[in-house]
Image (cartoon, rainbow, N blue to C red):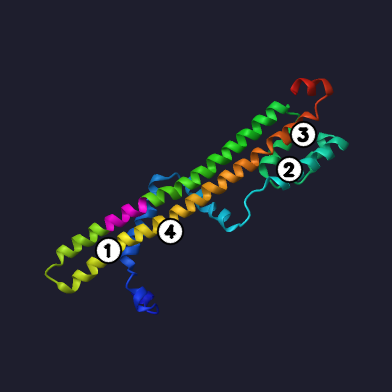
Amino acid sequence: MTIFADMPDWLGQFLDPTALILVIGGTLLAVVLRTPVRDLGRAVSALRTLVRGVPFAAAPALDQIAALGRIAKRHGALSLDRSVIADPDIAAAVAAIVDGKRPAEVQVLVVQRRRARIERHAAAADVWCGAAEIAPAMGMIGTLIGLVRMFVAMADPSAIGAAMAIALLTTLYGALLANLVAAPIANRLKRRARVEALARAELEAPLVALATQELPRGHAAVAA
C-alpha cells in the first residue's frame, strides 16, 4: 500500500493492489488465452489510430491517383514505377498497373486489400470487445475470492475488512475496466474502421480507371 501513500484518503479507500491484480491480470490472461498472437498485436497497434485525431481521408488519396493518371498519360504506365506512394493499397494497385494487369484484375486486388484491411480492423476491435466482456466476470471471480477469504477469517475481525474490500472493489474494477476502458476503445475502433472502409471504397473506381487508360483503345472499350 505504500505506492498509494501520497493519495488523498478518500481515493486511497478505493485502491487495493490485490483487487487490481485479480481484475486486470485476470482479464489480460483471459484475453491472451483466447486470442491469436497476431490479433493481440493488432489490438495494441490499433491504439495508435485513436491517438491520431484525423481518420483516413479519401481526398488526398484521390488527388494522388489523379496526379498519377496525368503522369501515366504523359510518360506511360512504366513511369509510375518511380512514384513515391505512402499508402500500401494504392501502391499495390499501381504496381499491378505497371506490371500490365488488366482493369478487372486491378479491381479484384483493390477489393481484396480493402476487405483484408476491414478484417484486420474487426479483429483488433474484437479483442477489446472480448476484454469488455471478460472484465466484469473477473470482477465477480474476485468477489467470490474475497467472500471466501472473509468467511475463512470470521474468527479474526481485523481480517474481515480487507477481505470484504477485495470482494467489493473487484466488482467495481471489473465494471470500470469494461465500461470506461475496453468498451469505449472497441467502439471507437469500430467507428474509425467504418469511416476508413467507406473512404477507401472511393479509391476503387479511380484506380480501375487508371488501369483502363493504359489499355489500347480496342481493349479499353472491351474492358469498359
Closer to the camera, 223 or 24?
Answer: 223
Q: Earlier in the sequence, mark 4 or mark 3?
A: 4
Span shown in magenta: 134-142
Query: Was residue 76 drawn as part of the magenta stretch in this picture?
Result: no
Q: Which residue is mark 4?
A: 180
- Type of the residue with mark 4: Leu
How many marks can you see? 4
Q: Which residue is mark 2?
A: 62
Relative horizontal placement of residue 68, taking residue 6 as reference (left or right):
right
Q: Earlier in the sequence, mark 1 or mark 4?
A: 1
Up-down relation of residue 133 to residue 156 (above or below): above
Tell me the tag on residue 168: 1
Query: Was residue 137 drawn as part of the magenta stretch in this picture?
Result: yes
Task: List x then y, in percent, for residue 140.
Answer: 28, 55
Closer to the observer: label 1 or label 3? Answer: 1
Task: List x then y, in percent, for residue 201.
Answer: 64, 38
Element carrying mark 4: helix
Task: List x then y, in percent, for residue 80.
Answer: 79, 39
- Type of the residue with mark 3: Leu
Q: Which residue is mark 3?
A: 210
Q: Residue at x 63, y 33 (%)?
A: 111
Q: CA distance from mark 1 to mark 3?
A: 62 Å
Task: List x then y, in percent, for residue 96.
Answer: 72, 33
Up-down relation of residue 93 to residue 48 (above or below): above
- Give the quadrant of the N terminus: bottom left
Q: Residues within 10 Å of mark 3 (few under 14, many from 20)?
A: many
Q: Are marks 3 and 2 in contact (CB under 8 Å)?
A: no
Residue 66 appears anywhere in the view: yes
**Magenta-drawn stretch, dominant element (helix, strand or loop):** helix
Element carrying mark 1: helix
Element carrying mark 2: helix
Q: Are marks 1 and 3 in contact (CB under 8 Å)?
A: no
